[in-house]
Amino acid sequence: MRSISIPRFTVFSEAHVLRNALAVFVVTTLFYAIGAMLRLVQELSLFWPLNAVMAAIFARYIWLNRSYYYAICYGAMLLYDVMTTQWGLASLVINASNMVFIIMVAQLVLRDKRRAGQDPGPINALRLFYYCLISAIFCSLLGALGSVGIDRQTFMPLLADWFSEQFSTGVLILPCVMTLCLPHELTRIHWKQLLPVLSLLLSVAAAIAVGGAGSLAFPLPALIWCAIRYPLPVTCALTLVTGAAEIILVANSVINLAVSGPLQTAQLFSTRLGIATLAISPVIVSTSVAEINNLMRQVALRADFDFLTRVYSRSGLYEALKNQRGEPHRYLTVMLLDIDFFKSVNDNYGHECGDYVLAAFARQVYDAVGEQGLVARMGGEEFVVAAKTTDPLAGFQLAEKIRQRVEACVFQWRQQPLRVTVSIGTGSGLSGNGALIDTFNALLVEADEYLYRAKKAGRNRTCAKSLDDAVLADTAAS
């Protein structure tokens, strides 16, 4: 499958203060302008993305939480108002309310980041919902107070408008911006992967066609399907687009909530809150799926690898061999390794020292084998190596390399040198065309037999069927 690499680019960087300041100013001005263009309902914006975007940026990049960055953000808002509105002193209060939402959400999220124990993703997603709720309340109180008199509006309708807008955009935008990431490469997309998105488009079309308050919930099943099939950043982005589209469609009566009359302020208030409540569901589902997948990977890792020695476990080795095919003209050499007199290490120095020796021994074997084969701990002090070799002699030479490396290694335990040796039995045979696991099982029996012979012959030696006794005698330690 062909892929296109995408160069990495970051807007904010901890080491570049001036670039960060310029970026905060530009992003603030950009999203302020977008919100101003969406002033479709009276003088206040129908969909105000600025506060949620900036709160997410300050929460995502902890080193941006400096007073001068917040001051630049606030100054950009005031400058835009000076150039485009006649609000005067009211602009100070209105934009201060914007900063209340930004700072409160950012600090609440950062508080979670500083917590010693991290909660699961779904819990954090639910907390984000409550953080938006709390921040929207304080923001709306100040914002509504500052907006009284603009276009002859009174406090209570303004409070409802401010609260519903801040809360809904916060829930929609914050997860998206906080998880946003560009892919490292673009790969070809199969049409079946687009089915959840297609169902989402159809559900929005059905909401337009049917109308009524219940139509707002039509996209929810499709969003949950997206949450199951797509990564969290994609789900958050689709949720944002869908929620924002529904709010704008309702405001323009494309989705008609009240067939008998025009849109009322109370209906828009209810629409915003309803969409915000629905929007958190796919985010929680997506974070739950991500947590489950991560847990499954951890369980699989623990099952496939020995926790102490960091090499394959017995079951992990079998799974790896099941997924590998043999090559007709190459050999598979199976080596069974047993640390000589390992019980005396435990008896004389304790089991903690024994664990250290096992881990250090496994590292020596792993380094000696390299990419040529697989290393696994079969249990206790017994290990196995499965290596692809050109012939049985090459397999025997690799086993000797391991034995000599272990013999020459001095293990340090609490400033006390320790030496161990290893006995190795090997079995070699053509790997064949099938799965390596079948050949491995047959050769393991042979390796076990020759390991017994190596121990009986005095230990610290390699024993193999394909070599005569004279050669075997030469492999013993002097």
Image: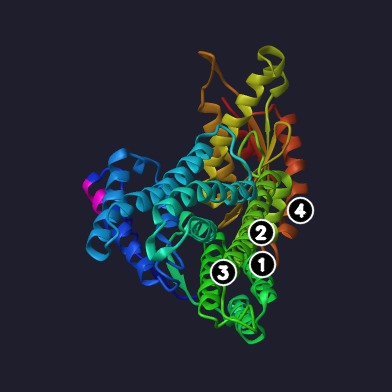
* Real-space Cα separation, disc 2 to disc 1, in angstroms: 7 Å
| Front-lying residue, 54 or 231 | 54
Q: Nearer the viewer, mark 4 or mark 3?
A: 3
Does residue 326 appear anywhere in the picture? no
Q: Residue 441: which numbered mark, if any?
A: 4
Q: How far apart are the alpha carbons under marks 4 and 3?
A: 70 Å
The amino acid marked with disc number 3 is Leu
Instruction: Decide: is 142 above or below 341.
Output: below
User: Gap in Å between the C-alphas at discs 2 and 4?
Assistant: 43 Å
Residue corresponding to mark 1: 224
- Name the amino acid type tagged 4: Asn
Residue at (46% x, 59% y) in the render: 180
- Whole-number angstrom distance, CA of label 1 to CA of label 3: 24 Å
- Residue range of the region highlighted in magenta in the rendering: 18-22
Q: Amino acid at mark 1?
A: Ile
Residue tagged 2: 285
Q: Nearer the viewer, residue 412 or 342?
A: 412
Q: CA distance from mark 3 to mark 2?
A: 27 Å
On the image, numbered disc 3 is attached to which residue?
268
Q: Sequence order check: which comes first, mark 2 or mark 1? A: 1
